[in-house]
Amino acid sequence: MSTIQSSCAYCGVGCGVSVSSTQADWENADVSTLTLTGDSQHPANHGHLCAKGERLLDSLSQPNVLRYPVLRSGIPIAWDEASSLIADKFAQTIAKYGPNSVALYLSGQLLTEDYYVANKFVKGYLKTANVDTNSRLCMSSAVSAMQRTFGEDVVPGCYDDIEHAEVIILIGANTAWTHPVLFQRILAAKKANQTTLVVIDPVATATAKQADIHLAVAPGADLALFHGLLGYLADNKQLDHEYIATNTQGFEEVVGDAQLLSADVAKLAKQVGVTEAELTQFYQLFTQNRNVLTASCQGINQSVIGTDTTNAIINCHLALGHVGRAGSGFFSLTGQPNAMGGREVGGLATQLACHMGFSAPERELLADFWQVDHVADKKGLAAVDMFDAVAQGTIKAIWIMGTNPVVSLPNSNKIAQALADCPFVVVSEISPDSDTAKLADVLLPAQGWSEKCGTVTNSERTITRQRGFIAAKGQSKPDWWAISQVAQKMGFNGFEFTNSASVFREFAGLSAKVKQVFPSKIFDLSGLTNLSDSEYNDLLPTQWPIASADQIGQQGVRVFTHGVFATPTGKAQFVTPADTNMSNSTTSTGTVILNSGRSRDQWHTMTRTGHIASLRASIPEPIIQLHPETLAQYSVKEGELVTLESDVQHNTSQFALARVVIDQDIPKSMALMSMHWSEQFSLGKGVNQYLDNRVDPVSLQPGFKSQAVVIKPV
Ligand code: SF4
C-alpha cells in the first residue's frame, strides 16, 4: 500500500487528504481501488473530513470528461493548433483595439502556479490588468478591509486561536455547512473550554442552532451592530488607550461617529433588529472577555457594505488591542481552496503579485524581475465590470478558467448573452457540460484535482501541496502549461517552465525580491526560494510568512504580534464607515428579499458535486425556503413549484424553478434559495439571474443576498 498526501478541492479550510493504492502502478490504477481518508498529520483537519471531502474520489467518475481541445463547432483540434489560434486572436485583438480589449477570468480552484503564470502573462506581457477571479465574488470585501486597516491583505490569526478563545463570534457564516471541519473544531473547543459561541445571522441556520447566543439581526444591520459596539466600548471606558495611541491611527475620527450610535442603545437595538437586552448582553460579552475571536464569511462579504462592515468589526478588536494575540481578533473564512493563493500572486485585477499595488516603484520592481520594459500601469476591470465590458463590446477576447460565470455572477442571463456575443471566448475546463463551456469558441481540457500538481493556501495562510495521483485523462494539461504555450506562440520569453516546481521557484524568488525592497511587507516566501524539485514535491504544509528554510513546516503563526503593521506609518488604520444607515436592500409591497446562499452538500455551480448521487440525495432539486407568514402572502402552498421576478429579470422564457419549503427559521421578509442550480442540473435557470450587479464601492464585490423579488406560482 502506498499513500500520497494532497489537499481537498472544495473549501478554504484546506483539509489534507491521504490517497492510498494497493497497486504498484497506482497512477494508472482503477479509481475504484483507491481509498481516501483525512490526513491525520495535516494541521487544518487532523484527519477529519466533511461529507464533500469524504466523497472526493466519487467526483472522478464525472460522466463527460473533456479529453482534447475542441472548437465551438465540435471539431477537435491539436493543442498546437489551439494555442496558435488563441495566440493569434489575442494578438490581433490587442493590435486593433489595445491591451484592454482582452481579459482573463480565473478561479479559486486554480493552483497558485496557474495563477502566477496567468498574472505574469496578462500584467507583464499583455500590458493590461484585466485579470480577475471568482474570488472577487467570495471575499474581496475582507481583502479590502484588511488592506485598509493592516496595510496588506493578511489574516492576522490562525486556526489555533479557536482553542484559545473565550468567545467565538461567527458573523454572516453558516460554518456548520460551508466549513464543516472547522465548525466541528469550534464545537470541540466549546465543549472542552466552555467557549461561548455567538452566531450573528438573520437566519436561524444550522450553525446558529448550536450557538449559545444567536443574534438574529436584520439583514445588513451588522455594520450598525459593530460600529455601535465601538461606541459602547468608549462609553464604558473599555478601550486600550495605550495600544490605540502607540499602534493605531484614525481613532478620534471613528469613535465620535460610533458614539452617535451607542448614545441611544434602544434606538440602536431597533435599527439592528434585536431587543435592547440582547444587544447589551452581546456588548457586555465582548467587553468582559479578554479573548474574543470574530470570524466572518459571505454574509458579510457578499454585500454592498461588506468592506465597511468588516472594518467596523476590526475597529472593535483594534480598540481593545486584540490583534495578533492568541485567541482574539478578526479572522476571515475563505470560500475556495485557493482563494488566498490566487491573491498572493496578484489574482485580483486590483493588485499586483506578492501583495503589491500599482505604484511606480512596485511596477518597476515587477518589470525588472520579469525582464519586460513595463507592466500594466493601472488596475484592471474587476469581475462585474469585466463582464459588463464584454457585454458592451469593449472586451473582445476573454479566457475563462475553471469557473462558471454564466451561473455564478449576478444578472447571470446577461453574462450568457455577453459571452454568446463576444467575438472570441476561450474556456479551460474539465468537462464540456458547464453552461459557460458551451459558449466557448475554443474549449481546452484542463487537468482536474487528482491529476494536477501545485500548491494551495488556505484561510490561515497554510500552503499545502496538491499532488496528482492518477494519470491525466486524454490530452488534459495544467493551466500554467496552457498559458505558457500561448505566451510562447505570441513570442514572449519567460514562459519556459518545465514543471510546477519551476513556476513556484520563480514566484518564491519574486517574493524574496519584494521583501528585500519593501521590508514592511508581511507576505514572504523567501525561505522557499531554492527548493529543488524533490523538496518542492515533499513540501510540508507551511504557514507564511516563511523567511528562511528552517521555518518549513511551521504552524500556529500569528502576525502583527508586536503591533507593527504594513501601512506606511506602521500603524493600523481605524476606518470610519461611509454610512451606517445604508442598507443592502429595500422591499416594497409584495416583494421579499432573496438571499442567494449555499447548501451543505453542494459546491459552487455543482459541476463537480452535482453528479454524486449521495450528495444530491440531501436536496435533490432546487428549493426555496419561506417563512409560513411570508407564504401566506402568496397564493402558493408548500410543495408547489414557483418562479421569481425581479427588476432585473422578468423574462418568462428564462426562469428559475424551485419547490416551496416552509421554514420557521427564515425571517418573514426573506426567501432563501441556493445559488448552485442551473440548467445543467435542473429544469430552470440559475437564481443569480434575478440579482442586480450592485457592488461594494471599495472591494467591487457584488451583493448576493439582498434582491427584492416577487414569488410567482407556476
Ligand atoms: Fe474539504 Fe472543506 Fe470539507 Fe475540509 S471542510 S473536507 S476542505 S470541503
Image (cartoon, rainbow, N blue to C red):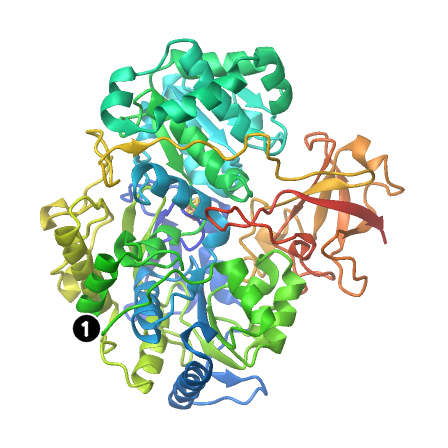
What SS does tag 1 mark? loop
- Expressed as whole percent of the image width and height from the top left, the position of residue 389 reads 54, 68
- Expressed as whole percent of the image width and height from the top left, the position of residue 289 reads 37, 14
The quadrant of the rendering that contains the C terminus is: bottom right
**Residue 693 sits in quarter:** bottom right
- Judge whether 289 appears above or below 140 on screen: above
> Which residue is disc 1 drawn over?
371
Q: Residue at x 53, y 36 (%)?
A: 174
Three-letter amino acid code at the position of disc 1: Gln
Q: Residue at x 48, y 30 (%)?
A: 170
Count up the numbered dots: 1
Residue 1 appearing in the image: no
The quadrant of the rendering that contains the N terminus is: bottom left
Q: Is residue 220 left or right of residue 10?
A: right
Which is more toward the observer, 383 or 611? 383
Q: Residue at x 66, y 48 (%)?
A: 619
Which is more toward the observer, 130 or 163? 130
Q: Residue at x 86, y 34 (%)?
A: 632
Q: Is residue 670 left or right of residue 186?
A: right
